[in-house]
Image: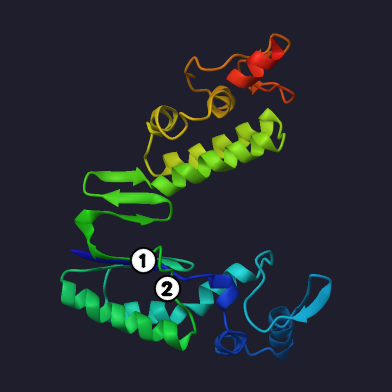
Amino acid sequence: MFVFRTDVHSYYASLDHRILYRQVREHVTDRRVLKLVWSYLRRIVCEGGEYVSVTRGISLGCPLSPLMGALYLKPLDDLMERLDLPYVRYMDDWVILAKTRWALRRVVQQVNTILDNLKLEKHPDKTFIGRIDRGFDFLGYRFVAEGLRLAAQTKQRFVERANRLYEQGAAASRIGEYVRHWLTWVRSGGLEPVWDELQGGVMRSSDVLVMVVGVWAGFPVLGCCEIRPEFQINSKLGLTPQSRPMNNKSRSDHA
């Protein structure tokens, strides 16, 4: 089996307004709604103190944008329905499977034609075309012959995000909430031992982060940190919101 996995480079920012508007008109006939959609597309933003009329792309923060983003790639969905190949798309991320290299090559050519018509480009760093047994990343997971794993970039982003929250002075409750939500998502893929992997590998360089997320997530923590005596630990909630663990440097300064 062979796989074609990719996503679109700067997807939201690349959507062509006229193409998207024509797609909306195929499903919506109410002129009032169409007028609102066009106003949503042709918005005015302030950049560097100047007001600029946006002629390409959709807003990241608007509740309507996910629907518009899903609709824009419907021609790809229609193609895959005609070809009747295994296919999964989540917004601008998709995976296509084929039994032979030649079948996959034909699919890639047809997909490229659709992307050209939609004025989109594949992300060069997130495109993989090859044998399934080589493994591929999709939606934060790594699909390999042995089973499902976390993608390396997923683990790294988690650590960077948690570190950034700590450096910004976020309360331990805020960091713990982020960790718990992230681990809930990880477990939804059936990956239970991920904490041991993170603590023993990618987190090794950050004893501060290990203590904070470990206590709050309810996991055993390696003995690499100390907590200042005045900070209390609640067995259910972890560190108090004002708590901060001390790394090696802060311990020496405190002494």
Which tag, 1 or 2, sits closer to the chain's start?
Answer: 2
Q: Quadrant of the C terminus?
A: top right
The reply to whether dot 1 and dot 2 touch (C-beta < 8 Å) is yes
Q: Is residue 12 visible?
A: yes
Please, what secondary structure does the residue beneath circle 2 have?
A: loop
Please, what secondary structure does the residue beneath circle 1 have?
A: loop
Three-letter residue code for mark 2: Lys
Q: How many marks?
A: 2
Residue 60: image x %, image y %?
65, 66
Quarter of the image where one finds residue 51: bottom right
Q: Quadrant of the N terminus?
A: bottom left
Residue at left offset 56%, top offset 29%: 209
In the visual, does 164 lie left or right of 80? right
Q: Nearer the viewer, residue 161 or 36?
A: 161
Q: Which residue in the protein does label 2 denote?
A: 122
Residue at left offset 49%, top offset 84%: 119
Quarter of the image where one finds residue 146: top left
Q: Residues within 10 Å of mark 1 (few under 14, many from 20)?
A: some
Quarter of the image where one finds residue 67: bottom right
Q: Which residue in the protein does label 1 denote?
A: 127
Q: Is residue 195 above or below residue 77?
A: above
Residue at left offset 71%, top offset 35%: 170
Q: Is residue 247 above or below residue 132?
A: above
Residue at left offset 63%, top offset 40%: 164
In the visual, does 150 lie left or right of 57? left
Q: Residues within 10 Å of mark 2 (few under 14, many from 20)?
A: some
Q: Is residue 88 visible?
A: no
Residue 188: image x %, image y %?
43, 43
Q: Is residue 237 above or below residue 29?
A: above
Determine the CA span between mark 1 and mark 2.
Answer: 7 Å
Residue 50: image x %, image y %?
82, 76
Q: Nearer the viewer, residue 28 or 240?
A: 240
